[in-house]
Amino acid sequence: MTDRSPPRSADSTSGELRKALLASGVFGFGFSGLIDVLVLHHVLQLHHLLSDVYDPTTLSGLRANLVADGLFSVGMVLVAGVGAGLLWRAERRAAAPLPVRPLAGAAVVGLGAFDLFDVIVNHTLLGLHSATDGPGYYDPHWAAVSLLIIAAGAYVYRTGIARARGDSAGEA
């Protein structure tokens, strides 16, 4: 399939960068959810998506949790895929290559945003599961680590934007 849109100007690169930053954050959100379910749910088996709803120590509860984990995995693959597709599209439409560092920072913010969403919505508001099976002793720690990940992503983003502005100003 050929992209038949007209060539883009340098002004459109900033618009494509904004789209790419959002897409990168969406990708990071989906990727973090996928890593969460693969590592914490399947490999380490610290909890399952619905382990506070269906007892995973019974066969029927474990089955329900594994189905929920699988559906959640599919959903996170779709979210990450949409983010990757939108990022690819923004890069293809930009007049110049998009700066990698701000995009990486936005992806890291997306990673932390998923983790913060998970602890606030899934752990606290909905009570679907805790960071480990049992009481939510580690949930505040999970939230603090999530905020640190978001702060690290924001730092990478900000320094990347400053570097990109400095590089383009030096070339003019």
Image (cartoon, grey):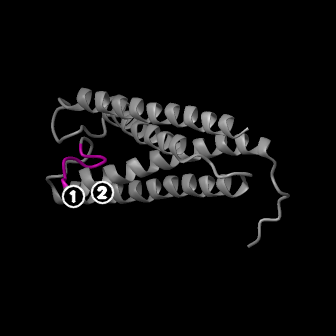
Sequence-first disc among 2 and 1: 2
Q: Secondary structure at mark 2?
A: helix
Pointers 2 and 1 in contact (CB under 8 A)? Answer: yes
Which image quarter is the N terminus in? bottom right
Q: Which mark is residue 43?
A: 1
Is 54 positioned to the left or the right of 15 in the image? left
Tell me how far mark 2 sits from mark 1, CA to CA.
Answer: 6 Å
**Viewer-closest of 113 and 105:** 105
- The residue indicated by pointer 2 is 38
> Which span of residues is magenta-colored?
44-51
Q: Residue at x 24, y 50 (%)?
A: 40
Q: Nearer the viewer, residue 92 or 83?
A: 92
Residue at left 33%, top 55%? Answer: 69
Q: Position of residue 18 (x, y in %)?
A: 65, 39
Amino acid type at circle 1 is Val
* Residue 170 as seen in the image, left or right of residue 95: left
Q: Amino acid at mark 2?
A: Leu
- Which residue shows up at 36% across the image and 38% down it? 115
Percent across and percent down for residue 53 are 27, 43
**Label 2: few (<14), some (14–19) or many (≥20) C-alpha neighbours in 10 Å:** some
